[in-house]
Amino acid sequence: MRLSPSWQKSLSFFAGVSMLAAIAALPITSLPLLSRLMGGTQVAPPSVLLACMGLVFILPVTVARKALLPAEWVPLAAFVAVALAAALLSFFFPQPEYKQLSIYREAAQAAVTLLVGIACFLSVSAWARQPGQFGWVFRLVNITGVLIVIWSAIQVYYTNFQSGHYPGWALAVHDSISTQSLLNIWYNKRAQGFAYEPSWLAHQLNTFYLPYWLGATITGYSAFRFRSWRISAENILLILGVAVMFMSMSRIGYLALMLVIAYLFLQLGTAAARRLAARIAIRRGLARSETEYMEKRYRMAAGPLLMAGFALFGALSVYLLSLIDPRIAAIFEQQYAGSNFFFIANNLSLAERFAYWGLGWNVFSLKPLLGVGLGNIGFYFETHLPQFGWSLNEMLKLIFEGNTLVNSKNLWTRLLAETGVTGFSFFVTWLTVVYISARTLMHHASPLFRTLGWLGVLAVIALVGEGFSVDTFALPYYWISFGLAVAGSFTARQSTSAAGAPAPGVEHD
């Protein structure tokens, strides 16, 4: 494919505009206009559409320049092939009927959401190649992060101190950018930002915003030059972002954040053991092998201490959360002592979640190799819902009054049920490859590339927890986080290869 330099320049410009617009639109998850155009779906983030436009512009340039795409997309491509094959094969096997819904329509919608999510990953990883591009992305992240914090604070103020009596302008603004009303009683006293619901706000913070702000805080990087008393915008936004995450009162959000903190405890212990062993080795003049052995011993000794420290931190965190979240406070109520597990889960508003997860697992047991096909898990709702689910009001209402197809509300059980152990394995392999790729950047000489490494690593860890709540492929946050990390790793590899030697300051684990 041949393109003139002027065409390449023009397409690159429009790709950049589309990608930056996609980053700017990330806080919005369900734009009303886009939702109506997509048939009334709840998941309607404009950033996905803009990222797809960016991919349309950048791919011809990539092909014309004979540029390479990051190798990290290969296991993802294998997962897509398995997922689409499972969807096609499902048409040749009998499926339970459910409320006269079409298996073809549901499979097509599921395939489209998967493909647009992957388009977000490919567009970012193919577009971002220069430090200036990453800089513009992170400036927009900070600006949109400020807007999320302000809007969430306004919501918490009016729901907690004004009895939910919002001024007309606040309702008008929110209704123009979200299909979910601020007056929804289910989300009373909870921040939802610009997202459809509070758990989606926690998801976007945990898988995109907080990993960047935390990574930048660790590396000392900032997208802005100005600082006050050595405090950067990212440092401040990290604190405010964690506060907003707590204001969302998302229990899965808490879990994802705790996983990230556990990883930081592990990294802290490893770094301390390495530094201590290095200092002793210098004093005693030990050989490298002796130093490595000493470092391993220190790590083993630090393990129980770190676990005890994290357990204490976790217990304190749960106690503090119980002061602001009635659902967590209910865990400590004496009325549940001696009760069975499902009675407790029902009274803590968790039984419905377990029922959805059980549905996914039961469907997986039917066809464990390739699953029942994308989007088909809901057709088995009546036949494979766990027995205790039939005693839950939400499930009975869905069965007798609902007219939509349910899902497992869990990314991991959805992958198992709809793509089988084969698709699940390829997806997990891709996550592992992204994690390893991001890890290679964490010791880079450039603070920017180290930040990209932390962004990718922390986003992968957060997704492990967030996957227990969000099961859609259409939310772009982890796709874009992974795309940025992979783009940074690819750029670093290309510059090292062009130089013919390892880049200064790069360490190899």
Image (tube, rainbow, N blue to C red):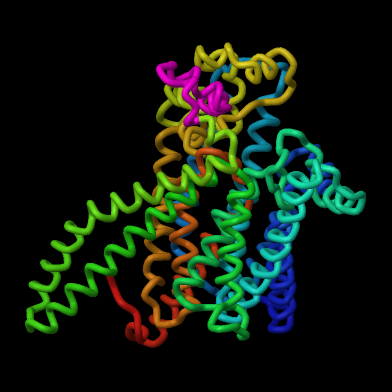
Residue at 13 percent of width and 62 percent of height: 297
Return the x and y of residue 418 as percentages of the image width and height.
52, 32
Q: Quadrant of the N terminus?
A: bottom right
**Residue shown at 17%/58% (left/top)?**
301
Q: Is residue 343 magenta?
A: yes
* Picture coordinates of residue 19, whole percent (x, y): 68, 67
Q: On screen, 170 above or below 147?
A: above
Which of 370 and 311 lies nearest the eye of the viewer? 311
Residue depicted at 55% across the width and 71% down the height: 235
From the top left corner, tell me how far across and down residue 340 is, in percent.
43, 16
Q: Position of residue 362 (x, y in %)?
A: 46, 21
* Placement of the C terminus among the 4 image quadrants: bottom left
Q: Is residue 355 magenta?
A: yes
Let me know if residue 240 appears in the view: yes
Image mark count: 0
Residue nearer the viewer, 192 or 436: 192
Q: Is residue 355 visible?
A: no
Rendered image quadrant of residue 393: top right
Magenta span: predominant SS is helix
Q: Check the image and report above or below for 20 versus 421.
A: below
Q: Does residue 213 appear to the left or right of 404 in the view shown? A: left
The magenta segment: 331-356
Q: Residue at x 59, y 52 (%)?
A: 245
